[in-house]
Image (cartoon, grey):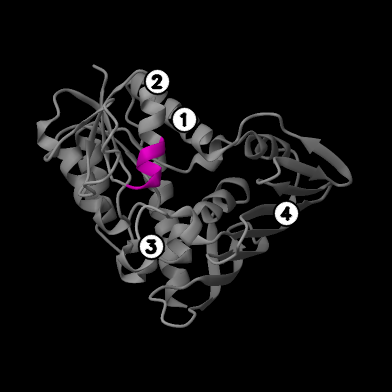
Amino acid sequence: MSNVLVIGGGSIAEKHIFNLIKLKYVVYSFTSNKNFLKDNKDIKKIKSINKVPDILFAIIANSTHKHLKFIETLAKRKIHIYCEKPIFYKKFNYLKLKNLLKKNNIHFFVGYQLLQDTKVKYIKEKLKKQIVKSFVANVGHNYEVWRKSKPRKESYYNKTSLGGGVIFELVHEINLIRNLIGDITEIKSFKSQFGKEKCELLAVSIIKTKNKILGTLYQDMYSKNLFRNLKIITNKFTYDIDFKKNIIFENEKRIFFKDNNSQINLLEKSICEFIKLIKEKKTNLVFYDAAVNDLKTCLSMHQK
């Protein structure tokens, strides 16, 4: 069974389709975007997700506010789910959905592809034998550059009410902090909108983890050039990870990573990890729990 369904018609859906074709899967595309890959003859476009026979798994890569509906529909059809982050943009019945996934033996995976980055894996291993004292995370990117599929005014990422805005869009850092430092127990956020924008373009947060480690998080969606870095100070080293330059500074020592950690390659690694879990035939909802915790943190950031 080599059929895969991709829901969505934006840049991330396009990257997933490219990788799936490369991995020799038959790709079915479901989107309301009539111009999406219109000249691509390697995909099968459908008008209903019920038209796809024998799906191995589905990728949900559409607007955040539509995720929940498709998760529920696919789970009832007993189709394994790879969902792009964030899982949703407001509270829902977390336990009810988890029970549905568990009842139908669904593998649920979330598109936190930065966890596949070799720098993150390197740091995670190093931190096992050290005590983290504090951290500083920074990420910025001009969303008009990275979201080119639709004009800004027509896109969900420009509307907090539809799951857009800097907190939801750049949730990777929340997930990284949770994975590398520990669960977040307290967060105080300051947010800014500019002009007539319908979402926050800037958020600065102070974070406390369950093991009482303090840190800060800076997120913006207007910087002209992408930057993403994470500094972690331990009892032995200061680690400074530069995701864009593919470098880690370990105190004064500079470590270059030759691996291809581009977004499209990390997405491929993430999909391969998901396929591996499916083949193990064990229901895995660890990513579901993580995604729910990240959503709760995002909602706390919006409330305060």
Say what amino acid the circle numbered 4 marks.
Lys
The alpha-carbon separation of the residues under discs 3 and 4 comes to: 28 Å
Looking at the image, tell me whether mark 1 or mark 2 is earlier in sequence order.
Answer: 2
When the figure is inspected, residue 164 is found, relative to residue 260, above or below; the finding is below
Looking at the image, tell me whether mark 3 or mark 4 is earlier in sequence order.
Answer: 3
The alpha-carbon separation of the residues under discs 3 and 1 comes to: 24 Å
Residue range in magenta is 10-15
Question: Are the residues at dot 1 and dot 2 in contact (C-beta closer than 8 Å)?
Answer: yes
Q: Which residue is mark 1?
A: 268
When the figure is inspected, residue 222 is found, relative to residue 235, above or below; the finding is below
Say what amino acid the circle numbered 1 marks.
Glu
In the image, 25 versus 281, the foreground residue is 25
> Which residue shows up at 15% across the image and 36% down it?
46
Q: Which residue is mark 4?
A: 231
The alpha-carbon separation of the residues under discs 1 and 2 comes to: 9 Å
In the image, 208 versus 91, the foreground residue is 91
Q: Which residue is mark 2?
A: 23
State the predominant SS element of the stretch in magenta.
helix
Residue 130 in sight: yes
Looking at the image, tell me whether mark 2 or mark 3 is earlier in sequence order.
Answer: 2
Q: Is residue 11 left or right of residue 116?
A: left
Looking at the image, tell me whether mark 3 or mark 1 is earlier in sequence order.
Answer: 3
